[in-house]
Amino acid sequence: MNSEQKFPYDFIGKVLISQQEIETRVNQLGEIISEDTKTRKSAAAWLLRGSVMFVTDLMRKVQRP
C-alpha cells in the first residue's frame, strides 16, 4: 500500500476480524441453524449483495438431510 495514500477511514488496510474468528462464528451459526431447523422444513434466502462466499461456507456447516 502506498504510504502517501489517504483513506477516509483509519481501519482500511487493517485486519478487523481474524480468519479464525470468522470460521469459529460460521461454525457456531451453522450449529444454531441446524438445531433450529430440525423439526421444520425451511429454506434459506440470502439477498445481501456479495454474500455468496459467506453463505456458501455457512451452508456447508448446516447439517440437514
Image (cartoon, grey):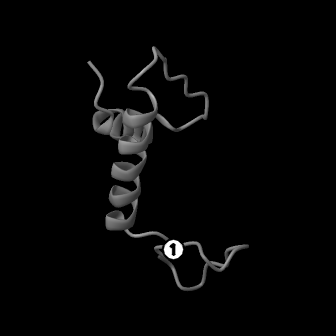
Q: Nearer the viewer, residue 55 or 44?
A: 44
Image quarter in which the C terminus is found: top left
Give the image quarter of residue 35. Answer: top left
At x 39% / y 70%, what residue is drawn? 18
Give the image quarter of residue 48. Answer: top right
Placement of 53 over or under 18, stated as above or below: above
Q: Nearer the viewer, residue 42 or 35?
A: 35
Q: How many marks?
A: 1
Q: Residue furthest right?
A: 8
Q: Residue furthest bottom?
A: 3
Give the image quarter of residue 41. Answer: top left
The x, y position of residue 38, in whole percent, is 38, 25
The x, y position of residue 43, in whole percent, is 49, 17
At x 46% / y 69%, what residue is drawn? 17
The x, y position of residue 23, in whole percent, is 33, 57
The x, y position of residue 3, in whole percent, is 54, 85
Q: Residue furthest top?
A: 41
Q: Nearer the viewer, residue 59 or 7?
A: 59
Q: Regarding mark 1 in the picture, which secondary structure is present there?
A: loop
Q: Nearer the viewer, residue 11 or 1?
A: 11
Judge from the rendering whether residue 63 lies leftward or rightward of residue 44; answer left or right.
left
Placement of 11 over or under 33, stated as above or below: below
Placement of 27 over or under 4, stated as above or below: above
At x 28% / y 31%, what residue is drawn? 63
At x 58% / y 72%, what residue is drawn? 12
Judge from the rendering whether residue 57 lies leftward or rightward of residue 7; answer left or right.
left
Q: Amino acid at mark 1?
A: Gly
Label 1 crowd bin: few (<14), some (14–19), many (20+), radius 10 Å: few
Placement of 48 over or under 39, stated as above or below: below
Q: Which residue is mark 1?
A: 13
